[in-house]
Image: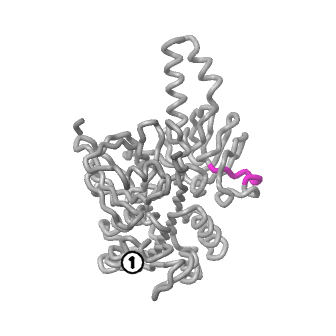
């Protein structure tokens, strides 16, 4: 270039500058340059040993580092989604030692679960050496998290408050991601905004984001008011463990709320590319009809992918289709989810309601529920 698998809405920015592990590493490096003999002292006073099951993994975590951040820095991928305590995807058990739980949604981790030794690894920080257990642990493998520049290739308003951004990546870079993941847009002052990737991985030279305008939102205000084609942005990704599990044979239920449709779109387009034969039921919930901003596309998928059924749901507008809350439509249609795999993306309240009801009322196994919840960034001062 010359001169983020997001989420779909501008999330609350809980990463004020860099990731804590990056900040800590930079501090140690600076101290080492000026006072080499302090390096071992700094390392001793800042790190804790984390033992991770399954797999008998072991790695260090700094004082200001969460379990998830330390695992990712060690090249280990744990289940996770929002990274701000909203979705519950990273929930695991503390087997030995203690953690500081940090701020999180009560729906993602209840007091009873905390008392049982459960924690959200995206916001839990070790208070000493700990042993923890995640639902699954995999190596990062061939998909690397990168920081890259990109160019705004196209801006398209899909609804009054939804903009599609098409980003073009450098031709010299190989960027890979899984269907449903997200990226972080890196702002000039070090803050981040997270957006889901709305296209499938086979077209990784371009990234599609769906951005909802938030009143007072700093980045979304720029997108809708001043962003121009050919503008250069920087991003980090891919991020998150919300992605299609291709090695499963379970029927799939996809649940999107608002612009939570973005990663679901990437998953469906990837399924089409693969010629996936698994039954898929897609529910897309919005308040009004204009909230289903790509309704025609979703309806067209039923013709392209055998076994896919699309169910739009409106909560605040009378129409001929389904009404009410989107997760309730799933409950009405499925008496038993014990053999299914469910992917949910949207506001934390919807994700919490879906998780609780699908598990307790429809028998969905905990390891078959994948979620990505978004919150809004704090409005900028005017």
Relative vertical location of residue 41 with respect to residue 292 in this rendering, above or below: above
Does residue 78 show up? Answer: no
Q: Which residue lies at the image location 67% right of the left edge and 72% below the top edge?
A: 360
Whether 119 is among the magenta residues is yes
Q: Is residue 52 left or right of residue 115?
A: left
Residue neighbourhood size for the residue with mark 1, other residues' Cα within 10 Å, grouped as few (<14), some (14–19), many (≥20): many
Instruction: Kindly state the secondary structure of the residue where label 1 is placed.
Output: strand
**Residue 276: where, in percent of width, then height?**
35, 70
Q: Which residue lies at the image location 38% right of the left edge and 71% below the top edge?
A: 293
**Residue 206: where, in percent of width, then height?**
28, 53
Q: Nearer the viewer, residue 203 or 278?
A: 203
Task: Classify residue 207 by image quadrant.
Answer: bottom left
Q: Residue furthest bottom?
A: 320
**Residue 35: where, in percent of width, then height?**
54, 11
**Residue 355: where, in percent of width, then height?**
61, 67
Q: Which residue lies at the image location 63% right of the left edge and 32% below the top edge?
A: 63
Whether 202 is among the magenta residues is no
Relative vertical location of residue 62 with respect to residue 179 in this rendering, above or below: above
Relative vertical location of residue 53 with respect to residue 313 in this rendering, above or below: above
Span highlighted in magenta in the image: 114-120
Residue that badge 1 annotates: 308
Q: Nearer the viewer, residue 381 or 296?
A: 381
Which scheme is used to colour this image of the protein? one colour
Q: Residue furthest front?
A: 382
């Amino acid at each position: 270039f010359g001169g983020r698998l997001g989420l779909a809405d501008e999330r609350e920015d809980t990463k004020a500058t860099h990731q804590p592990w990056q900040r800590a590493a930079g501090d140690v490096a600076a101290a080492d340059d000026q006072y080499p003999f302090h390096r071992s002292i700094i390392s001793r006073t800042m790190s804790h040993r984390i033992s991770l099951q399954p797999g008998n993994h072991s790695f260090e975590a700094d004082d200001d580092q969460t379990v998830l951040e330390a695992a990712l820095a060690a090249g280990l991928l744990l289940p996770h989604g929002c990274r701000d305590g909203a979705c519950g995807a990273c929930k695991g058990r503390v087997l030995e030692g203690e953690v500081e739980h940090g701020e999180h949604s009560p729906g993602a981790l209840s007091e009873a679960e905390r008392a049982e030794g459960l924690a959200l690894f995206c916001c839990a920080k070790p208070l000493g050496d700990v042993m923890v257990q995640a639902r699954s642990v995999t190596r990062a493998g061939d998909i690397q998290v990168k920081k890259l520049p990109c160019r705004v290739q196209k801006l398209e308003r899909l609804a009054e408050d939804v903009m599609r951004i098409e980003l073009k990546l450098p031709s010299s870079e190989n960027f890979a991601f899984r269907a449903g993941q997200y990226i972080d847009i890196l702002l000039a002052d070090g803050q981040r905004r997270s957006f889901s990737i709305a296209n499938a991985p086979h077209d990784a030279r371009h990234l599609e984001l769906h951005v909802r305008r938030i009143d007072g939102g700093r980045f979304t205000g720029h997108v809708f008011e001043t962003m121009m084609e050919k503008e250069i942005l920087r991003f980090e990704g891919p991020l998150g463990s919300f992605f299609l599990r291709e090695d499963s044979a379970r029927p799939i239920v996809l649940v999107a709320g608002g612009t939570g449709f973005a990663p679901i779109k990437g998953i469906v387009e990837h399924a089409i590319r693969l010629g996936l034969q698994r039954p898929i039921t897609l529910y897309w919930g919005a308040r009004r009809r204009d909230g289903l901003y790509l309704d025609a596309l979703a309806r067209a998928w039923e013709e392209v992918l055998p076994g896919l059924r699309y169910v739009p749901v409106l909560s605040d507008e009378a129409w001929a289709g389904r009404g009410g809350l989107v997760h309730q439509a799933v409950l009405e249609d499925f008496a038993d989810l014990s053999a299914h795999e469910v992917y949910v993306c949207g506001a934390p309240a919807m994700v919490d309601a879906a998780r609780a009801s699908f598990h307790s009322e429809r028998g969905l196994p905990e390891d078959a529920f994948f979620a990505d919840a978004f919150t809004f960034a704090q409005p900028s001062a005017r």
